[in-house]
Image (spheres, rainbow, N blue to C red):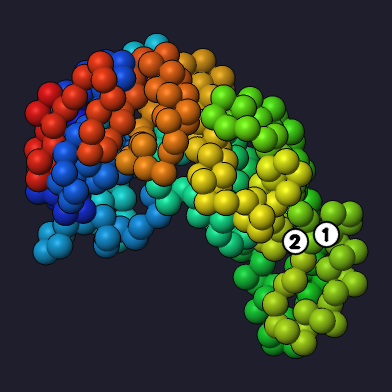
């Protein structure tokens, strides 16, 4: 997939931007606080990606809405995507037709690599679990629907636990039904994802990576809920289920978040994103747009060269940073204005 045109108005700290990206690999180069990250976030959001920010944080201070527009070319044709971001919600138009966010996931979309991705590896289990849920959700409508249903049942069950527990049996069954399917989805997905993740990491750094799904109820979830009921009533919350599980990243058999260096964690995080890109490529039959912010930060020369080797094989990829590698075309960024 190729991004042909990108325009934005009042997105984050930028007033207006419009540019026609070159095909192939190119670099967005500019000083600090010139808008490089905002441009990548805007492109990613326009193409159906998720960012860790509230709508209020995505709208320029003092404005009522932000506007994003992307024109893309895929093997199936040309698409124009427009989004309006307001405090009350997000409106999406695809080829002049109002659609849901899920409709954009039918396109190859984009993968955004950020410096803070290392926190997926080193941070809390909530961070790792959210990463896994977002990733699987890009491939499966059913999984996204299951998560929504599970979270609704979880809220209801927790409310009953706080109120004394009357009527719990019905919600035990609901939670177990959705939760069991979520856990099965996760296991199947990780079995498919692991060899790609390992292959990508081998191209970046030494040491074999692994994935360990630590489940709070690896057997019968309904039985686990019944067994822990007294403890859950005392604490007023559900203590077992996929909402409490963890995805642990291993390097040479050891949990990276406990025993790995920051440099090792950075390599694992980068491999995760590039593996996501490869899996989406396989799923759609064409490459998503790859966006790398501060692409060389904390990377040694070997990892930089591996990233460049991969990005040079793609129809389009954007490296954002303070400098561009030799031979890579440059678009200059200053105050959100892009000159290619």
- The spot of residue 198 in percent (x, y) is 66, 30
Please state which of residues 77 and 331 is positioned toward the viewer in this rendering. Answer: 331
| Residue at the extreme front | 301
**Above or below 131: residue 320:** above
Marks 2 and 1 close (CB-CB < 8 Å):
yes
Secondary structure of the residue carrying numbered label 1: loop
Q: Quadrant of the N terminus?
A: top left
Work out whether residue 211 can be spotted: no
Q: Residue 148 in the image: x percent, y percent?
A: 58, 55
Image quadrant of residue 26? top left
Circle 1 residues within 10 Å: few <14, some 14–19, many ≥20: many
Quadrant hosting residue 89: bottom left
How far apart are labels 2 and 1 at the CA level?
Answer: 6 Å
Task: Please determine whether, in this image, residue 264 is positioned above or below residue 305.
Answer: below
Residue placed most toward the observer, 9 or 210:
210
Image location (x, y in percent) of residue 6: 20, 31
Q: Which residue is mark 2?
A: 241
Write the residue at 12% across / 24% down.
Answer: 340
Q: Is residue 62 left or right of residue 252?
A: left
Asked whether the viewer can see residue 154, the reply is yes
Disc 1: which residue: 217
Residue 321: numbered disc: none
Above or below, 291 against 212 in this view is above
């Amino acid at each position: 997939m190729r991004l042909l045109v990108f325009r934005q108005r009042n997105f984050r700290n930028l007033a207006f931007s419009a540019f026609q990206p070159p095909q192939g690999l190119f670099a967005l180069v500019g000083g600090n606080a010139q808008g490089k990250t905002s441009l990548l976030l805007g492109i990613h959001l326009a193409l159906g990606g998720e960012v860790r920010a509230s709508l209020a944080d995505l709208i320029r201070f003092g404005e009522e809405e932000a506007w994003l527009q992307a024109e893309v070319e895929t093997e199936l044709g040309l698409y124009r995507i427009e989004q309006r971001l307001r405090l009350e919600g997000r409106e999406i138009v695809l080829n002049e037709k109002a659609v849901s966010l899920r409709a954009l996931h039918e396109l190859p979309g984009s993968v955004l690599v950020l410096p803070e991705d290392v926190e997926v590896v080193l941070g809390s289990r909530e961070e790792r679990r959210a990463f896994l849920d977002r990733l699987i959700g890009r491939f499966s409508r059913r999984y996204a629907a299951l998560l929504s249903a599970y979270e609704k049942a979880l809220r209801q069950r927790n409310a009953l636990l706080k109120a004394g527990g009357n009527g719990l049996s019905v919600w035990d069954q609901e939670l177990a039904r959705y939760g069991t399917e979520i856990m099965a989805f996760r296991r199947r997905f990780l079995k498919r994802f692991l060899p790609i993740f390992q292959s990508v990491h081998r191209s970046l750094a030494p040491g074999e990576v692994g994935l360990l799904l630590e489940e709070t109820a690896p057997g019968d979830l309904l039985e686990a809920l019944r067994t822990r009921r007294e403890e859950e009533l005392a604490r007023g919350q559900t203590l077992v289920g996929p909402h409490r599980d963890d995805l642990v990243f291993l390097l040479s058999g050891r949990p990276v978040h406990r025993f790995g260096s920051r440099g090792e964690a950075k390599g694992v995080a980068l491999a995760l994103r590039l593996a996501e890109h490869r899996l989406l490529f396989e799923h759609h039959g064409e490459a998503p747009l790859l966006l790398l912010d501060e692409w060389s930060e904390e990377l040694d020369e070997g990892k930089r060269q591996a990233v460049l080797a991969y990005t040079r094989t793609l129809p389009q990829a954007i490296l954002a940073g303070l400098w561009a590698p030799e031979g890579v075309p440059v678009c200059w960024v200053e105050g959100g204005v892009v000159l290619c």
